[in-house]
Amino acid sequence: MVNFLIFGPPGSGKGTQSVRLAEKFNLKHLSTGDMLRAEIAAGTELGKKMSSIMSKGELVPDEVVIELIAKKIDSTKGSAGFLFDGFPRTVAQTVELEKMLNKRKMKIDSMLVLEVDHDELVKRLVLRADQSGRPDDKDPKVIENRIEVYKEKTEPIITYCRERGIYQPVNGMGSIDDIFKRLSKHMKELI
Ligand code: ADP
């Protein structure tokens, strides 16, 4: 099993690239954002509690996403590894993920970080709002907050992974195909 984190600020293209990469390399794509939105759509208790946090652009509690991920790790069969998208988002989540993987004789093999200019991020998110119908993409204040939360709580994971020698920056500017090729090249080296 080879396990990747795909990493980058909101709007950096993680979701778009993950779907394609997972297909190409037979990886199980796990997106906590998608899992949480599915809870909301299904009208579960958890979904109801989380939707107000998400609509403000804040992070839901670590335990919530850790539990969602743990369930999926154990129910996945036949994939070459995992592609974690939007998770971990805090150093605490990263430590927990490592523990979960280590217990199952796996590890985080590489952290691919999409690097995109701030102005380009905002542009993409505003455009996405029209198509996705995601409430957290509609309000520019919420978009800015999500980018702030990323800088404050999520970006420190980069230092953590750099110290472990698994940090791999990737240029996230340009066409979807070009970025896909760049990411694929790094993944191929490990698969
Ligand atoms: P984006 O595409 O903007 O990066 P996601 O679709 O990954 O956003 O997530 C949407 C929202 O779901 C986040 O703003 C946050 O409120 C919540 N969320 C998703 N994953 C996590 C996580 N690992 N920890 C805490 N909150 C999360």
Image (cartoon, rainbow, N blue to C red):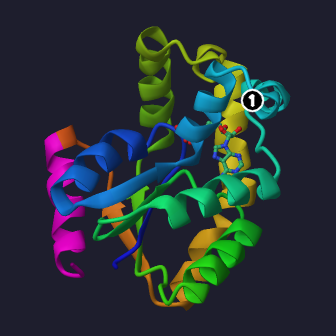
User: Is 30 on the left or on the right of 42, as rendered?
Assistant: left
Question: Residue sitting at 58 percent across and 39 percent down?
Answer: 35
Report the quarter where the C terminus lies: bottom left
Report the quarter where the N terminus lies: bottom left
Question: Residue sitting at 75 percent across and 56 percent down?
Answer: 152
Whole-percent x and y of residue 83?
A: 40, 61
On the question of residue 12 being in view, the answer is yes
Q: Is residue 139 magenta?
A: no
How busy is the neighbourhood of tag 1: few (under 14 within 10 Å), some, or many (20 plus)?
A: some
Whole-percent x and y of residue 49?
A: 85, 30
Residue closest to the eye, 96 or 91: 96
Which residues lie in the magenta part?
177-191
Q: Is residue 181 magenta?
A: yes
On the question of residue 175 being in view, the answer is no
Whole-percent x and y of residue 175?
A: 19, 39
Question: Residue sitting at 14 percent across and 56 percent down?
Answer: 181
Q: Is residue 137 placed above or below 79 in the rendered structure?
A: above
Q: Is residue 168 placed above or below 40 in the rendered structure?
A: below
Badge 1 amino acid? Gly
The mark tally for this picture is 1
Whole-percent x and y of residue 172?
A: 32, 50
User: Is 97 on the left or on the right of 170, as rendered?
Assistant: right
User: Is 101 on the left or on the right of 190, as rendered?
Assistant: right
Is disc 1 placed on a helix, strand or loop?
helix
User: Is 77 on the left or on the right of 58, as rendered?
Assistant: left
Residue closest to the eye, 76 or 182: 76
**Mark 1 within 8 Å of ligand 1, using the beta carbon:** no
Q: Which quadrant of the picture is home to ligand 1?
A: top right
Q: Is residue 105 placed above or below 53 in the rendered structure?
A: below
Helix, strand or loop: magenta stretch: helix
Residue closest to the eye, 124 or 50: 50
The residue identified by callout 1 is 47
